[in-house]
Amino acid sequence: MSRVIGIDLGTTNSCVSVVEAGRPVIIPNENGGRTTPSVVSFTREGERLVGDAALRQAVVNSARTVRSVKRRMGTDWRFSVDGRSWSPQEISAMILQKLKKDAESFLGGPVTEAVITVPAYFNDIQRQATKDAGRIAGLNVLRIINEPTSAALAYGLDNGAQQKVMVFDLGGGTFDVSVIEIGGGVIEVLATNGDNHLGGDDFDEVVTGELCALIRSQHRFDPRRDPAALQRVRDAAEQAKKELSTSERAYISLPYLTAVRGEPVNFEHTLTRTRFNELTRHLIERTAGPVRNALADAGISASQLGRVILVGGSTRIPAVQDMVRELTGREPSKSINPDECVAQGAAAQGANLSGGALTLSGGAAARPGGGSGLLLLDVTPLSLSVETVGGVATRLVERNSTLPVHYSKIFSTAAPYQSDVEINVLQGERPMARDNKSIGRFRLGGIRRAPAGVPQIEVTFDIDANGILKVTARDLDTRQEQSITISGSERMSESEIDAAIRDAQRYAAQDGTRRSLLEANGEAERALSEARRILEKGKRKLSREDKKALKADISALEKLMASEKPDRMGESDIMRIREAARRLNDTAGRCAPMAE
Ligand code: AMP
């Protein structure tokens, strides 16, 4: 089995890790960054940019750039550009492909297997969409694991003493809090809670608002009306926020923001931590409810927590850490970089699944024999029901049930001589079916004619360790059965996934060809400029034959380059350019000593 990578596919940033010599290490991207922006951009020239490159030109190309696609996972949202429309799975797959490629460069060989993490709040459809994204990117996704579970693995807590742990994860766009019971090789998620729309972006927005108001009052210029200026203010706001995690003051300088009546607008300001705390207090307070709810759902008080782990870049904010201390009465653990913790845990789990031995931080020793030692017990994030008479949601699986789950219940028919039943599978906490989310529907037919209430239909819910749900309905009389692995309308069909995989492969090949063409053009340009220089320098000294040969080779290469049609060029066309450049280089090399 090749090396399994662990991927934290984040809303704002993603991170990838692999176990090397028994320890999870972070795989840097091609720019040396330890996390990669989860941003995809489509340039007007038909190039697809992912990560830092996409983020850099997100302002000038905002309509062709996708950010925070994770928020769209499991929905039927599409991103349309250049006459094509992309699903969230396909956009996520582009990010995954980039992470896979960076991992391949780092490891020096193909990478085909991964463990990917998702927020504990993700429902079944969102989990399946993430798995599909992995498949489209050419990855065999061995496991989808919850981010808090992964963080606990990174701390190696699974092998220590039995204890209850809170994982407090405040990233760029989401907040998750989980209570986990851990120790002796078992991790059980007791409860999860959070806020899908709370994260560092909100802090940036509040600071941006403050800076915009100051700029407006000082300069009568509203940056919100100028996208490029607004982006600069946003970047400065995020930078200041990060500085305030370690300093009491952050100096903001935005020269030449714009010109008002010919005069440049230069903005300078010092933001103090005290003011930042005032501005963002309401955001920090929003973490309290989910923390209390998670503790209540787990049936424990804060004093029963053995440990609190901080995850996500925004937990570096001192006021966030103060809030955690206040709510839990514990000094939070932050020895592992909070941006990298989740990916490290996923890598650890990946190594575990492939049988690699591990040495994790937190003092855990290498697990003898690796593989089978660890049992992961996650929970269902929401309750699961089926719709019964009168539009009632009859619950089969309670929220926060430990995975894997296997649960059956017997139902019957509501009308006399009813020959088929419709099973409407629901996810949510509300008593009426219509208030929950319908995540799948199917029919079981061929029921023997009988008065209402006589046929016995057994409905079984099976949820595997990845949180993927299979529902089966069986007529106990005829033994007929029907099942679905949830196929809600938002979920991609098998054929759609296959088409997307083919597409991704085709684009990967096209991207490769485009890169070769750029390189070949670079070589050709260099050869042409050198040959022209020699021709110019050797005007008088070069023999007529040499001049003729040089001119002929220059013109042949120029013609080839002029006839380029990037979208239709294959490897053989690129080879021809390379050969012509080489020939020109040879001729120029022969002539150079005479010309000098
Ligand atoms: P993550 O999704 O975990 O990568 O977290 C990204 C979020 O963390 C972004 O909103 C960042 O601005 C924020 N972040 C990163 N470093 C810091 C820091 N030193 N102080 C405050 N926020 C930070």
Image (tube, rainbow, N blue to C red):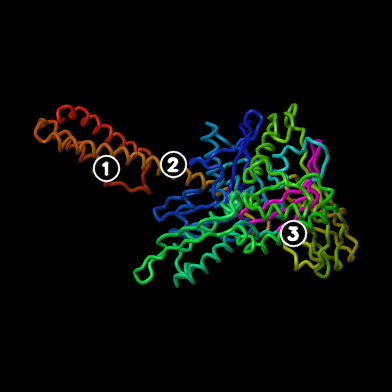
Classify mark 3: helix, strand or loop.
helix
Q: Residue at x 83, y 56 (%)?
A: 296
Of tags 3 and 2, the one toward the viewer is: 3
Instruction: State which quarter of the image contains the C terminus.
Output: top left
Residue 379 is one of the magenta-drawn residues: no
Name the residue beneath numbered marker 2: 512
The alpha-carbon separation of the residues under discs 1 and 2 comes to: 20 Å
Query: Is 321 on the left-hand or right-hand side of 69?
Result: right
At 77% from the left edge and 45% from the top edge, which residue is drawn? 307
Q: Is the Cβ of the residue at disc 3 closer than 8 Å to that at disc 2?
A: no
Residue 43 percent coordinates (x, y): 43, 54
| Horizontal side of residue 301 vs 178, given as left or right | right
Label 2: which secondary element: helix
Q: Which span of residues is magenta-colored? A: 165-194
Q: How far apart are the alpha carbons under marks 3 and 2?
A: 49 Å
User: Depth check: 57 or 269 in front?
Assistant: 269
Task: State which quarter of the image contains the N terminus.
Answer: top right
Residue 427 bears which disc, if any?
none
For residue 382, what is the image quadrant? Answer: bottom right
Residue 194 picture location, percent across and down: 72, 57
Taking depth in this image into account, of 24 and 421 the one nearest to the observer is 24
Disc 2 residue type?
Answer: Gly
Ligand 1 under 8 Å from disc 2 Cβ: no
- The image shows residue 7 at horizontal and vertical percentages of 62, 43
SS for tag 1? Answer: helix
Looking at the rendered structure, the kind of residue marked 3 is Ala
Q: Position of residue 319 (x, y in %)?
A: 67, 55
Q: Which residue is mark 3?
A: 288
Instruction: Quickly name the residue at label 1.
Output: 560
Residue 184 inside the magenta-drawn segment = yes
